[in-house]
Image (cartoon, rainbow, N blue to C red):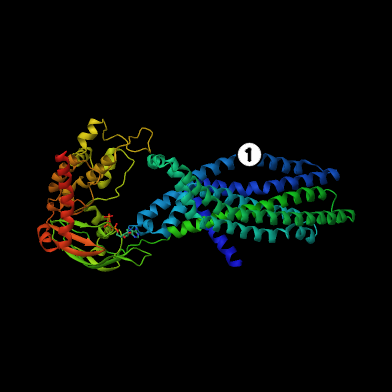
Amino acid sequence: MVKSATNFLNLYRKSLSEFFKASPLYATILFVLVPIQSVLPAATIAGSQLLLTSLNNNDSPITPAAVWSVSVIALGIAGPIVTLTQGLLTDRLVAHINLTLMEHSKKLKGIATFETANYYDELEFIRSQSGWRPVNLIVFGLDLLRDTLSVVSYIVLLAQFNFIVILLVLLPIIPQAIFTYKIQQDAFETMVDRSPQSRKMQYYAKTLLANTDAKEVRIFNAFDFFIKKYQHTFTQIHGRLSRVRLKQMRISGAYAIVNGVALVVSLYLVIVGIQRGSYPVASLLTFAVTVVSLSQSLGSLVESSSLLYDTLLFMQKYYKFLSRKDTLDVPGKTISLPKVPFAVAFNHVSFAYPETDKKVLQDITFEIDPGSTVAVVGENGSGKSTLVKLLLRLYEVSSGEIMINGTPINQLNVDAFRHQIRVVFQDYSKFNLSLLESVGIADLQGFTPENVKLALQKASAWDNFSEQKISLQSHLGKQYEDGIEISGGQWQKIAIARAFLNDDQASLAILDEPTAAIDPRSEFEIYQHFAELSKNKTVIFVTHRLSSVTMADKVLFLKSGEIMGFASHQELMRTNSEYAEMYRMQAEGYVKGLDKSENR
Ligand SMILES: Nc1ncnc2c1ncn2[C@@H]1O[C@H](COP(=O)(O)OP(=O)(O)OP(=O)(O)O)[C@@H](O)[C@H]1O
């Protein structure tokens, strides 16, 4: 209990320091004004009692009247200033928390955090709440400060009464507070637990409402299917949360009754005290007003601190994410390679994705000569994209070693190494930016309108865009009001253009199924430019179109994470029956297709 209270206070203190990081000015104004604002109600009550006493004693009422007046006026002025500053600080804090998260993601050079289910859930939870949780941190964080100071100031006012009176007012609140924190923790844990389910619910709603799945949902008439799935998941998680909240309400009601009885008893004690002459008559006013205000402030203190507790549990996850280290092991001193074509060597490389046991690559050993072109082929799931990810050092190998120009990959400077690579991913990004930026992002220091245009030409995209009056400045995608939605093939051509951008400065090009959505004419044109792309650099391309392997010096044939063959296409055709069969099957399918159309 003491330990968790200490943790709570430490986390609160740490979280408050975020206010100052977000805006030192607004935070300072608030931390000066809120305490003053908090004690002002008690000051007005004290002023009232002094006023009554002075009138009763025929003394001058000027000083107590001044205390009362100044307190009331200051209270009126402080309110709007605090509200304004709180609003301004909230905006800053939301931006600060999100920017800190984004800055931290910069340090995570590996992608395990983003592709592993557990990490992903945690990240999604933080990301989905980072837009509004900081607001609660300010609101409840300041409420706690305000309520604490108000409670202290009311207790000071009550100090003139018997100790038992104070105890009667304060005691019932302690079990109530403990219980409320416990319930809040249960509610939070229920919410965190349900985060995978919440994601499911969001997914079902999005499938029906977003444009990405609109076609198939309608063709399959799958509306009720998704609505039922949503309702089912909602009922599951809502039931748990409702039970926690109902329990909270029942027990809070019971404590309210205990509290009420304690207040009545304390009023009785004060009346008896006044009748006996222990307290002045005017103190009844102080007691009546203070006890009600104190009771309200105590209730509010418990509520705000329990709600803050909920927010602090979020902050705990936020700090945990910030303390998350990169999944790559980056040495203190790293090596940058000269701008020459890369020689790539895999030495007995095996790999299992984090938190899984299955080796998706097993004992892979091969060498690629600098400046040569290698095609990687194999069935779905044979490990081709995984090999690419390891070569880009998005993951660390489980065992074995990858060497680039004779240097182990994990001794290279990650940023410099990646900057020497041009890459097209199978699941390429559709950056909702201008056309210029969508391509330029591949070389942020070196892109110009001219070289972006050249890259788009090599990707066989420029004429197509020009015909549709899409300029370099046009915004792509639906994120913008004036954004233009382009076709799947056009998005892919932009991804290819990124590989062509300033490609003469790269040492390695990696193309993972680069032309899957491209029309045959464009594909032919792009492949013609590939010859240019492969000049002065090593090229590795993953493909299912075996017709394109003839462009490669060698073919790496993978099956179930193992190398089945690594030789020229001609040699594999001669020596590897499985490869030859795969190639013939594709070629026959194509020829049969031709025969059919000719016989029509
Ligand atoms: N992030 C991941 N976490 C866990 N397993 C993964 C992950 N990504 C891929 N896998 C698994 O690794 C294996 C190899 O996948 P990979 O994507 O490398 O195959 P591929 O040869 O590129 O397939 P395709 O031809 O379909 O693109 C598959 O069994 C897949 O399920």
Which quadrant is the N terminus positioned in?
A: bottom right
User: x and y percent of residue 182 in the render?
Assistant: 62, 60
**Rendered position, 329 above or below 238:** below
Q: Quadrant of ligand 1?
A: bottom left
Comparing 77 with 99, the one in front is 99
x and y percent of residue 290 in the render? 75, 50
Q: In which quarter of the image is the C terminus?
A: top left
Q: In this view, does 293 lie to the left or right of 384?
A: right
- 238 left or right of 323? right
Q: In this view, does 413 lie above or below 49?
A: below
Question: Dot 1, crowdedness within 10 Å: few (<14), some or many (≥20)?
Answer: few
Work out whether residue 409 or residue 491 is closer to the camera in this orientation and state it: 491
Q: Position of residue 599 (x, y in %)?
A: 15, 40
Q: Is residue 539 visible?
A: no
Residue 268 can be seen, yes or no: yes
Mark 1, residue position: 77
**Looking at numbered disc 1 in the image, what kind of residue is underneath it?**
Ile
Snapshot quadrant of residue 178: bottom right
Name which residue lies at 43% across and 41% down: 221
Q: How many labels does the image show?
A: 1
The quarter of the picture where residue 388 lies is bottom left
